[in-house]
Amino acid sequence: MSVSASTEALRRRVAELPGTNHNVEVAPGVWTVPDQPPVLEDPRVRCIVRAVREALGGSLAGARVADLGCLEGGIALAFALEGADVLGIEGRATNVAKCRLLEECFSLPNLAFEQGDARDFRPEKYGQFDAVVAAGLLYHLDEPVEFTREAARCARRVMVVDTHFTPDTEEGVAALDTMPFFDLSWNPLMEAGEVSAAGEKFQGRWWREYAEGLAEEDVERQLWASLNNPRSFWLTRASIYRLLTTCGFQAVGERLDFLAPSMDLGAHMRTKSRSVFVGVRTDGETSERMLRPEASLKASVRRFRALARTSGLRRAAKDLTKT
Ligand SMILES: C[S@@+](CC[C@H](N)C(=O)[O-])C[C@H]1O[C@@H](n2cnc3c(N)ncnc32)[C@H](O)[C@@H]1O
């Protein structure tokens, strides 16, 4: 088979822009990170896309999706190929250049990238999205609560947070096997602590992104790291649930369908610190109501009493309100 001059030129460009993880076939036989599995078939990526598709009722066509901290653009591309209108936001120029290559090679009118700080992602600047995806980002931030709250305000329907979290106990941390992502033996999680945001406390541990005082150009070269915070705060699993709930997502849970069916789930839960958290707005209830659960409880009791009056269950209603 003869290879066209343009394919050869593309192959050279790809070689000049070596990727780290999102392996995409940009022309027949030209892969961006040939030593990695294809990103579009990555079970984690498929799981994220599936979570959003299902939350949006079975189709991504026309859905507005934001992919924050999008690295080399592979997850954004996966959404765009299913018809979503996607904006990928990435902080590092080196990574954005690789996203631009995808933009160019796929020429999809529904795929766009921009260089930006995910911590500026708020509705006043970017508007509303049907889905907001933050994959591999939360644990690189030193203010994960503030970031999530702002990003969630942009999410009309669903927010997916694929992230590391920290176990609550020292025993839990000691049992962790975070390879291949992190070798915590050389860069350990620190002692348990908490962060406060708007008067509410969230539990977790600090983790070192890079040495304090590292030169800016060296930070830029750490292609997966935070942009400028030398430490990041890993929330506990319970804090992530509470955070998403208080952001007004009524259904909050985890997707574990990125695991192979043969995976030992018990071992996974004991030794892995990564999960795909999903928050869905199920019925358009306001976050205000979710923040004041006692208001919902009173409303439920009132509804039950009204029903009881009309259906002869007066006594049951009386008993219920006594408890
Ligand atoms: C571990 S990689 C995750 C990449 C990708 N989302 C994935 O899940 O495969 C983290 C990415 O977030 C980017 N990043 C870190 N902090 C950021 C910030 N504040 N704003 C935008 N991008 C950021 C990094 O440059 C890097 O590309």
Image (cartoon, grey):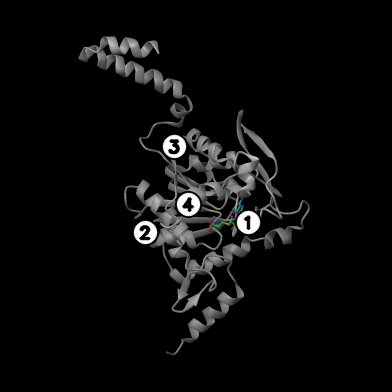
The secondary structure type at the circle numbered 1 is loop
- Quadrant for the C terminus, please: top left
User: In the image, which disc is placed on residue 249?
Assistant: 3
Camera sees residue 256: yes
- In this rendering, would 280 be left or right of 31? left
Mark 3 near mark 1, Cβ–Cβ under 8 Å?
no
| Residue found 44% across the figure and 64% down from its top | 40
| Residue found 48% across the figure and 28% down from its top | 291
Give the image location of residue 79, x and y in percent. Answer: 42, 58
The secondary structure type at the circle numbered 3 is loop
Image height of 315 relative to 194, above or below: above
Q: CA distance from mark 4 to mark 2?
A: 13 Å
Is ligand 1 closer than 8 angstroms to the Cβ of mark 4?
no
Pointer 4 residue: 66
Camera sees residue 110: no
The secondary structure type at the circle numbered 2 is loop
Mark 2 near mark 3, Cβ–Cβ under 8 Å?
no
Pointer 1 residue: 182
Circle 2 packing at 10 Å, graded few (<14), some (14-19), many (20+), is some
Viewer-nearest residue: 301 or 262: 262
